[in-house]
Image (cartoon, helix red, strand yellow):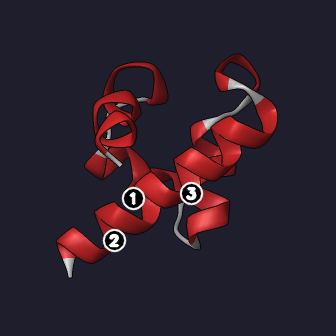
Amino acid sequence: MEAIRRGELVEAAIHEIGARGSLNVTVGQIARRAGVSPALAFHYFKGKDQSFWPPCARS
């Protein structure tokens, strides 16, 4: 389940960053797109700037 949720967040990040640009997207927007709370997004990734980039780059 954790891997699935993490994957959903990465997919949401890819979409949101692609649509808005990395400087204009928040973790809250990414979480909303993934259907989770911002708190859960922070559980998996400590912040968009440091934690979303490596998984997004691998996708």
Q: Position of residue 26 (x, y in %)?
A: 65, 34
Q: Residue at x 36, y 49 (%)?
A: 59
| Dot 2 alpha-carbon crowd within 10 angstroms: few under 14, some 14 to 19, many 20 or more | some
Q: How many marks?
A: 3
Location of residue 2 by image quarter: bottom left
Residue picked out by circle 3: 12
Residue picked out by circle 1: 40
Measure the alpha-carbon separation of dots 3 and 1: 14 Å
What amino acid type should be assigned to the residue bearing mark 2?
Answer: Arg
Report the side of 44 relative to 39 (left or right).
left
Q: Residue at x 65, y 36 (%)?
A: 17
**Pointer 3 or 1: first along the chain:** 3
Q: Position of residue 6 (x, y in %)?
A: 31, 62
Q: Given contact means CB atoms under 8 Å apart, are the residues at marks 1 and 2 in contact?
A: yes
Residue picked out by circle 2: 5
Mark 3 vs mark 1, foreground winner is 3
Report the side of 20 relative to 34 (left or right).
right
